[in-house]
Amino acid sequence: ATPTALMVGTGRGAQLGILIKGPEVLESTRRVDTVVLDKTGTVTTGRMTLQGVYVAEDADEKEVLRLAGALEHASEHPIARAIAAGAQMGVPPLERSREWGSAGDLPVPEHFENAPGLGVRGRVEGHEITVGRFPGALPQEPARAKAQAEAEGRTAVVVTRDGVALGVLTVADAVKETSATAVRELRALGLTPVLLTGDNRAVAEAVARAVGIDAGDVIAEVLPEDKVDVIRRLQAEGRTVAMVGDGVNDAAALATADLGLAMGTGTDAAIEASDLTLVRGDLRVAADAIRLSRRTLATIK
Ligand code: ADP
Ligand code: MG
């Protein structure tokens, strides 16, 4: 290979907003036939807002939100930020969610623990609280609200106190404007797009539908430590896999993929684990990157 052509390739990459770890990276793009896309923060903006609070008839929305907000205040997760901010500031009531405002000052948890891919748990005012997708039975009204939110592509998390489900909080995250175009461009390059997420299947399928990914290519409810196994399984099927991600959760999968692409708007862990960084966090640039490196390789043949 002529080093000059590779240098030109990486220089052009910088102009497009692609940081390339080393010229040898371009070589891995040649055989890529599958592109795995993380959902939250990659296909969607990752900036979530609290939308609704749904509790059983006899429960109090503000109280449920106060307990959840207290725990989530200690977490950095986008869902956690949305819930903590919503609890502190209050949000206008939405359809079906009863009117509620700020939950007031949030108590400081006596104990707090992150359960990656599941949510948070801890002790607040002497009670064991969980927020997330921990298993457990839900009262009828919150269960209905959860199913409806998920069918519409919103994420619903359950709040429990001492093992009893109190209600559901829904958060919404918007699909990036550029994601559908990006998926179309990736397909035009002959790649099969796959959506990979820890989120609920219904939410994942709604997002997939919005951007043009087949329901059969949605891999949902995957724990963070299992994302890397998904990549290995696809590779074992004989596929050459590119992965695009942004989270700490994606780092191992990004490192294992034949080509790892990090969103520049994402975490340092994802960027360090990747071969390429898409500086502006625009998924269309993933297609540019693959097109550019194929062209660069063609030049040096
Ligand atoms: P993704 O793979 O889409 O980036 P994660 O693996 O971070 O998502 O989270 C998967 C699911 O776990 C979320 O959709 C949510 O149901 C639950 N979850 C994770 N973190 C939290 C949290 N801090 N609070 C509530 N639920 C959470
Ligand atoms: Mg993510």
Image (spheres, grey):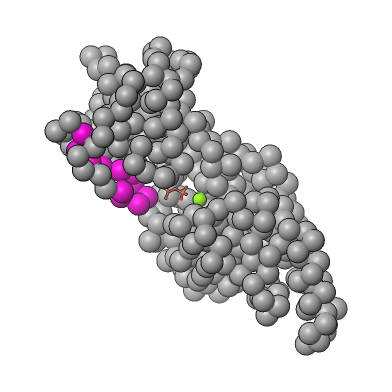
Residue 90, x across and y down, in percent: 43, 20
Q: Is residue 199 left or right of residue 214?
A: left
Task: Ligand 1: give its quadrant.
Answer: top left
Magenta stretch contains residue 115: yes
Rendered residue at 50%/43% (across/down)? 204
When the figure is inspected, residue 135 is found, relative to residue 238, above or below; the finding is above
Rendered residue at 49%/62% (across/down)? 269
Residue 112, x across and y down, in percent: 25, 44
Task: Choose between 256 and 196: the one closer to the eye.
Answer: 256
Task: Choose between 68 and 259: the one closer to the eye.
Answer: 68
Residue 251, x across and y down, in percent: 48, 63
Residue farthest along the top direction in this orientation = 99
Q: Quadrant of residue 63?
A: top left
**Quarter in which the N terminus is drawn:** bottom right
Count of numbered circles in the view: 0
Residue farthest along the bottom direction in this orientation = 1
Magenta stretch contains residue 40: no
Task: Choose between 194 and 167: the one closer to the eye.
Answer: 167
Q: Is residue 112 left or right of residue 5?
A: left
Rendered residue at 58%/42% (across/down)? 45
**Quarter in which the C terminus is drawn:** bottom right
Residue stretch in magenta:
114-124
Using the rendered image of the protein, determine whether residue 239 is visible from the camera's viewpoint: no
Rendered residue at 81%/66% (across/down)? 12
When the figure is inspected, residue 22 is found, relative to residue 160, above or below; the finding is below
